[in-house]
Image (spheres, grey):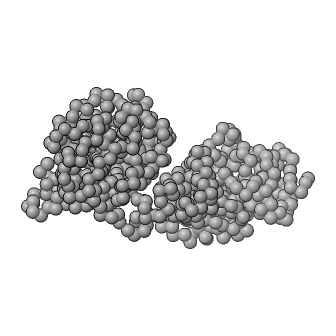
Amino acid sequence: RSKSHYKMETHTGWNSSQEYRDIYSLHQSRSPAASLHAAAGGCRMRLTCLFPAGACTAEKGLSSPRALMVLWWGRAAWLISGSSLVVRRSLRVPLLQGWLFQGLASLGGDSKDVGSGQTAANGGGCEMEGVGQPASPLRAPAPSPATAEPGSPPCRYDDQELLRNSSFCLVPRGRHLGSLRFLEALQAACIPVLLSGGWELPFSEVIDWKKAAVIGDERLLLQIPSIMRSIDEDKVLALRQQTQFLWETYFSSVEKIVLTTLEIIQDRINAHITRNYVMWNAQPGGLYALPQFSTSLADFPFYYLALGRSPDKEFTAVIQAVSPLFSQSQPIIKLILAVALSKYCTQIVVLWNCDKPLPPRSTWPSTTVPLSVVEGEHKVKRESSRFFPYDLIRTDAVLSLDEDTVLSTNEVDFAFMVWCSFPERIVGYPARSHYWDSSKGRWGYTSKWTNEYSMVLTGAAFYHRYYHYLYTFYLPASLRSMVDQISNCEDILMNFLVSAVTKLPPIKVTQKKQYKETMMQQGSKMSRWADPEHFVQRQACMNSFTNWFGFMPLVHSQMRLDPILFKDQVSILRKKYRNIERL
């Protein structure tokens, strides 16, 4: 009836091979692209295709030319998939997508491979509910049993389950060049097979879509199955992993889409300080790789493996001092002497966050490495000041210590060597865990000694200095202010940050179980371990941090790393870290 809009009246019981052939002839002159650009409109029908005779029956009637699209493309779709399905559509998206989503998913098996990781349409009249549709209240209601074919077995496929079990998902062009199915495929870790020439993919300025999608030619539809079969399993796994990375990093929420857009604009404006292509397309993503810190991949802990290098074998010890210095027998003095004996230590920095004046230099012990005593960046914000990116910290590795920590030189050396193998994680001694309290409906914090942990406290831990920059300039001021106000939870917040960035748990190394008790005995009355409100505050912090991140980033682990021959019944002379077992 018009150049861009064909419409067919609904006829009850329309069932004629001649009428089908007439409709087929009507659309032979229309190109695939033109067919996919047909006008929008609701459509709900059941198609039973009998391809040997070339006939097609519409049992529920037609209200949109998108039904004609399926008829026009029916034989091509049948060559890939099965012979019968139910298509229900309430959104303004071409009906063809429902056919091709399941059709291409059947590669590598016949039409009976449903649910085996490569799904297919069932040829016996089973229902497919909303294939390719998002979980939306706009979806049409489920069909009644009356719509099922007589004698057909009752079965139903869930669209989201089909997507998750599929390796490839066809994404033809929609009413416009883009398609909502593209994001659905990313979310389900289904490799998008794009059939939309000229489509500028989202964030293509910085994202390498060839690592996550297959770019097809909509004019060569029947060649798509052979192209998919030519992709080996390792490549398929890499593509699916990249789809999950891109979805979680840039597309999983409106907030992330907006932040990504703003960061791209900022990179355009500040062309001299910009992220490179690798930062956008490799873990942890462009939102966590801040170019203000550095534009070189070698300065970040995430890219050592890709660059084929290891961290430098040196570290800086940062000791948080909050108590006055009265005598040479205090725990902080013993700690400085033990750390200074490490062959990997290049300097020791004491952050003086005590209310008392800074002691004279003569009161500090003499060490073989430089010892610097500086006042915290903000004494009123002393908890957050321990994670401030001070210019005097030049090494990649930072050993964060509380003033009442008790560690030997052997313990320091061993923990550092472990960190060199895992530079993107927190590696240390005191471990804690979290759990879900179903009775209270909130997250809980526990310090019980178990075989599982999710946090390593920064009172005795190694991590990369880049996390100082993230803590100060990425986290909101509201979280840091809360930590400074209660003088607690800064170590939990750092664990949240690192786990959110890496998606990995920290690493606990060998240490005596008396860590907490020793600190309480040797620490002053001002020690946080002696504060009865300490545990209650940490419970509240867990839930406040979770609310800001939008999810629980902490990951449980049961791995503990010990030195070789640790506690083995062999001569002590054969062990490298001999003093650890004597503690």
Percent across and percent down for residue 493 are 40, 42
Q: Position of residue 61 (x, y in %)?
A: 79, 46
Instruction: Please give the count of numbered marks on the rendered protein.
Output: 0
Task: Report the front residue among 555 and 169.
Answer: 555
Q: Residue at x 51, y 57 (%)?
A: 291
Q: Give the left or right position of residue 307, taking residue 446 as reference.
A: right
Q: Is residue 543 left or right of residue 578?
A: right
In this rendering, position of residue 544 left or right of residue 427 = right
Q: Position of residue 189 (x, y in %)?
A: 54, 55
Q: Nearer the viewer, residue 495 or 240?
A: 495
Q: Is residue 421 left or right of residue 278?
A: left
Q: Along the line of sight, which residue is nearer the eye, 106 or 5?
A: 5
What residue lies at 44% left-to-right and 51% top-to-bottom?
469
For this orientation, the residue located farthest to the left is 571
Q: Position of residue 283 (x, y in %)?
A: 47, 58
- Would you say residue 578 is visible in this rendering? yes
Q: From this viewpoint, which residue is outermost toward the right?
A: 1
Q: Is residue 148 above or below residue 342?
A: above
442 relative to 220, above or below: above
Q: Which of 561/88 is in front?
A: 561
- Residue that appears at 67% across and 44% down: 148
Residue 114 shows in the view = no
Residue at 31% across, 42% down: 352
